[in-house]
Each structure stands twice: as C-alpha cells, then as structure tokens.
Image (cartoon, rainbow, N blue to C red):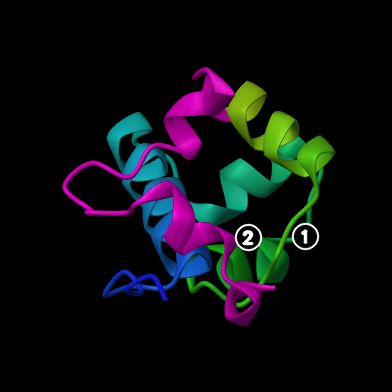
Amino acid sequence: MAIKPPIPPLVLFGQNILRVRKNAGINQEELSFRCKLDRSYISDIENGKRNISVLNILKLACALKVHPKELLNYPGADIKPESICEEEWN
C-alpha cells in the first residue's frame, strides 16, 4: 500500500490556486469575476473542499493567466504516482 502524502490532493490544489492568485495580486472577488465562478466556490476550492472539473481548472488557469499544469504542480510535496491512485482519494 502506498503512503499517503501529508496533505490531501484537493488541499494541495487549493493551496496552488491561492498561491497563484496572491502572486497575481487579485482577491477572490476579482478571480470569480474573471472566470465567471461564484466567490464562495473559489473559497471552497482554495480550502480543499471542492473536487472541480477540468473545465473549471481551465477557467481558473485562463483567469490567472497561467498554464493549467501550474495549478496541478505540487512543489515540495513528495507525491508518488501510486499514492494519488488510492481509492481513498476518490
């Protein structure tokens, strides 16, 4: 059995959104306006409470002016491919 990463993938994804948004110098309200998603939805994403669709990842990437892969990159996290395939993450 693979070892789970210390932080769940949805939380890591949310931290990436938060990091990129803050680096862009915008607040949740502005991001929600740019990508046409509700501000509370953005908050839920950043807090690791939402498992969002590919289309919404693309909307966020466009609104943040980054490549979608930047939102899925987990710098510093020791995530092994087999650990993200565990049923517990689904």
- Which residue is identified by label 2? 42
Q: Would residue 3 appear left or right of 59 to someone viewing this image?
A: left
Q: Secondary structure at mark 1?
A: loop
Q: Which residue carries the number 1 mark?
A: 38
Q: Examine the rendered structure and indicate whether residue 24 appears above or below residue 33.
A: above
Q: Residue at x 46, y 48 (%)?
A: 17
Q: Is residue 49 above or below residue 36?
A: below
Tell me the element at label 2: helix
Q: Would you say the residues marked 1 and 2 are in contact, meaning their CB atoms lie under 8 Å apart?
A: yes
Q: Which residues are magenta?
A: 64-90
> Could you say which is closer to the camera, residue 43 or residue 4?
4
Is residue 73 on the magenta stretch? Answer: yes
Q: Residue at x 36, y 30 (%)?
A: 24
Q: Amino acid at mark 1?
A: Asp
Quadrant occupied by the N terminus: bottom left
Q: Position of residue 81 (x, y in %)?
A: 44, 48
Please name whichever residue, 79 or 38, is drawn nearer the observer in this view of the structure.
79
Q: Is residue 8 left or right of residue 80?
A: right
The amino acid beneath tag 2 is Ile
Kindly report the distance in space between the C-alpha atoms of the residues bearing marks 1 and 2.
6 Å
Give left or right: position of 67 versus 7.
right
Q: Position of residue 35 (x, y in %)?
A: 74, 37
Q: Is residue 74 above or below residue 45?
A: above
Within the image, what quadrant is residue 40 found in?
bottom right
Front-most of 40 and 84?
84
**Residue reaching furthest left?**
76
Is residue 34 in view?
no
Q: Which mark is residue 77?
A: none
Please, which residue is most extreme toward the bottom here? 88
> Quick one: label 2, few (<14), some, or many (20+) residues within 10 Å?
many
Which residue does the image show at 79% across and 51% down from the upper left? 37
